Image (cartoon, rainbow, N blue to C red):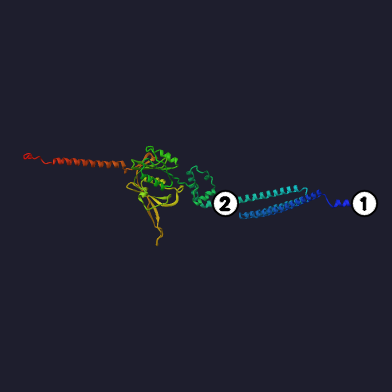
Amino acid sequence: MAKTVARHAHGGGAGGSRPAGANAQAKKNSTASGALRARSQHGKANARRDADDDDDTRKRQKRELVSVKSSHGGGDEDDAEDDDAWDDGSEDDEDDDDEDDGDAGEGADNTDEGGEDDDEHVAALRALASTSSGRKSLLVKHLQAQIGEGEGEDEDEDEDDNGEDGQEEDEGQDDGDDDAGDGDGADDEKPAGSKAVASRNGAADGPIPKNKQRVLLIASRGITHRFRHLMNEFHLLMPHSKKDAKLDSKSHLEDLNELAELNNCNNCVYFETRRHQDMYMWMSKTPNGPSVRFMVRNVHTMDELKMTGNCLKGSRPILSFDKAFDGQPHLQLLREMFVQTFGVPRTSRKIKPFIDHIMSFSVADNKIWLRNFQIVEKPIEKGMREKPISLVEIGPRCVLDIIRIFDGSFGGTTLYENPHFISPNDVRRTIKAKITEQHRARIASKEERDLKKLRDLPAPDPFADVFA
């Protein structure tokens, strides 16, 4: 009896309380089974979501394809075939989805083969994605082909409408490209569509030539204060100009071409002073010419004139030329040189986007008169349609007397020589000769007066010594 009670007591203790190791193992198994169950459920949800997305994508692609074919004249038979193809593909995809769902369910039941089922599920999803991407690429290619054919037909219709005018414009554009030389290779490789658009718009295919003009202002040694102020005012009126140090030599003017090249200038204005009183202005197109030499007369600066006109520093001027510049050939050449020298290009870095003054070039007495005026706009009064415009002189002013025009830069063959030009040395020589003649005349008259006085003396009195 005592043995039986002890055995029952021992058995009840063993069944009622488990060891600590057994409890830990049980918790671990329950956690693993919960993780596998959650993983399988997550896989099923992802598979359903991917299947729904693929169905929506296929339906949208099918609608786009049908709309494209209907817009470009696709037949009903092609539509039916495409519908069957898409339906077959959708059924196959649904079967694949069902198989994937079944595999996922089996993976959830068989905890030992869960990793292998997940790998198979991922592989199936990748295959499905590749299939959908391949269909998308085929649809994109089809759409691009249809759009390309439509653009080609539109371009052909536009070219037929243009006719001979479009052909003439294309020929003019090709000539412009040939004249432009080997500039940019991208212009020669433009498609026909861009040429058609350019011909319709009336624009040239080649690049628009830019007016790149830079002027070097330089003076010689011995320049006076008046001429120095004139050069500084020219520099203010020409924002595309650049000043350099004085030139020592007056005989080697060809060095100015190298100075202009070093300063990246293609025009040069050289102020040459002689005898500290005569100023000659060279205007040259470096380095190949032509060039012209002027005698600058009647110089008046802005500070000296004290005019009421004013203009913005760096603004672009309007160049006004007399009708006489259209007559003689040498004046036509001078007009072009003035335009390239005093005309401020629109691409200059120091300009202001304003036009508020006029530089006037007039011909009178075989000389060129240079003036600078401000454009003043007065308010509109009653009965006026436009604003009244007046001109107020700013300065400076000077007179340019043409001496010679040379073929080269600062020298070369003489293209034109002014027969009306008189050198200031000749003028001074004439004045000195006139003064000398006057002096000689005065001396001669004085001598004549002295001789006359001697001749007019009274005769000696013979009775002067009688009463002495």
Q: Position of residue 429 (x, y in %)?
A: 28, 41
* Residue at point 27%, 42% (across, down): 431
Question: Is any part of residue 9 visible from this angle?
Answer: yes
Instruction: Tell me the residue that label 1 is attached to.
Output: 2
Q: Residue 83, located in which quarter of the rendered image?
A: bottom right
Q: Amino acid at mark 1?
A: Ala
Classify 10 Å Cα crowding around label 2: few (below 14), some (14-19), many (20 and above): few
Q: Position of residue 253 (x, y in %)?
A: 39, 38
Give percent across and percent down for residue 221: 37, 40
Q: Position of residue 391 (x, y in %)?
A: 38, 54
Towards the viewer: 94 or 39 = 39
Q: Residue furthest bottom?
A: 382
- Please give the residue where the numbered disc 2 appears in the rendered image: 151
Residue 110 seen in this snapshot: no
Q: Residue furthest left?
A: 466
In front of the other: 386 or 139: 386
**Camera-side residue of 222 and 262:** 222
Q: In the image, what residue occupies the spot 48% across and 46% down? A: 176
Where residue 273 is drawn, which disc sits there?
none
| Residue occupying the far front of the picture | 468
Q: Is residue 79 above or below residue 181?
A: below
